[in-house]
Amino acid sequence: MEPQSSWPGARSPTRHDVPQASELPDTSFLSEFKARLLAHQDAKIHQRRVPVHLLQDRFDLDDVRPFTYPLTVLSGFPTLPSNEELGQLRAAFVVTFQKHAFVEPIINRERLSDPVPPYLDVAVACLGSVLTPASMRGGMIGDDLFLAGFQLTTFMAEVDNRHSRLLELPAALAMLSTYGMLTSNRELWTRADSMFTYGLTMARRQAIFDLRAYSRDSLDRSKDKSRTLACYMLLADTVRSIQCGTETQLSPGELSVSLSSDPNLRFSDVYAHMFTSRFGLPPSVSGDEDGLLLLTAVLSDYLLVRRLMSTISTRKPSTIADLERIPASCSNLYPFMHLTPGMEDVRMQSQLSNAISHWYEHFVKNTDTPLSHDVVALYWYARLLFECPDLLELSKLAQDEKRPEDRTTFAISDEAVQFAWYVLDYVTAPNADNCCGGTAIWTPPITFHAALVVWQKLRADTEVNSGALRALDPFKEALAAMPWPCCEVMVATLDALR
């Protein structure tokens, strides 16, 4: 009989291998091992060579933490409100923000896991704290709930990997990042950015952007919630790029979901139809959510094109008037057109401009059921962005601490000012005509940017004085009426403009 080989590849694995490998050695064995290491002659020589002050700096006894990872994630965990107060905040969310586009199917208690993960309850309470009257909330309760939700999601995903397969995890991260990007604390912007990226990774792992990856049994159960979560994440990503000036991380091309008005139509097919067809969109495409989704996709692509082309093209960005003068043949790949960064920029902007024109004709101009006013306000902001490509730079300019005469001046057309007033008109429309109950996450940044366009036009045409700046008062009143924390800083910025 041949002796058994000691080579690991020659042995037959058994079911006991993993438990045996995971067993900790006996305490006496570890103590004897450490004692022999310290007693060795080489150890004594190296101990004398290490300076004492380096050992003291390396091992500061006052900085020793009682726990290791992942428990260290919960170090500095903020104090949460009582269960009664959390219940009030969640109730405020249900009354207000749950009416927001794409939110209700995600947070519907009847469709959530049982029991509901605690980080989702904290995320709902965090947004509820914004929408609760000031007399019912105190101090920095929203910021504390934001940090608590951030730590809870990280901790529970590390301890129990089952949470990484729940839709509630990316949903909670999307809700928390919404609060973070609409605060006035720029440190929370950074955390919200990383939080949204983490939630986006979890959503891609669960394939919520492509429902073809679901089996037929699980499709009916989670299709609606997955579809609305994918749509909300695209919306939140676009608003985050507008508000914080960051790059978009989710491309509309990733979405392979159906439309709410017609489940037989896929978003990707209808979105491509906006660019290629001359006959408009299918008649069955209608409603606030479908209109908002398609409009958000155009905005997301435009922001990506502007950021990419600005790094390689020296050509001045085109306005709507420039794009309308481009021949129809140039909107597609014209064979005799020079392939340069500038012409490629013109071609892509022309296609996006045509797509948004098709959107307006279908959802606003030629329809018997007009969209909600806050969705139409986002359309006029998109037109404003096309007309004033430097719009996102105005936010940095307004917060610049230089003297007014030293600030850069951007050229603002009369049509851009007209679009800015259209944005204000639709933002301040009655809440009964809004699909989000007055809590639309895109209204603060688009109202603020519209006000900056009016300010820049006044600054460029006339000598700005207190009388001229009264034109900004309607914008400040609209921002002051919004519940989001960033609005207070926006109003203060408009007050400080000269």
Image (cartoon, grey):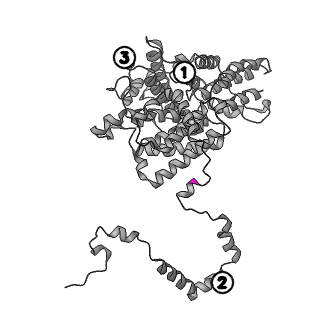
Dot 1 lies on which element? helix
Q: Residue at x 68, y 35 (%)?
A: 396
Q: Are marks 1 and 3 in contact (CB under 8 Å)?
A: no
The verdict on residue 323 being magenta is no
Residue 289: image quadrant is top left
Q: Is residue 258 left or right of residue 403?
A: left
Dot 3 lies on which element? loop
Q: Is residue 20 left or right of residue 60?
A: left
- Specify the principal SS of the magenta part: loop
**Vertically, is 186 above or below 45?**
above
Under mark 2, the amino acid is Arg
367 or 67, nearer to the observer: 67
Spot the residue most to the bottom: 41
Dot 2 lies on which element? helix
* Quadrant (top left, top right, bottom left, bottom right) of the C terminus: top right
What is the magenta range?
A: 74-80
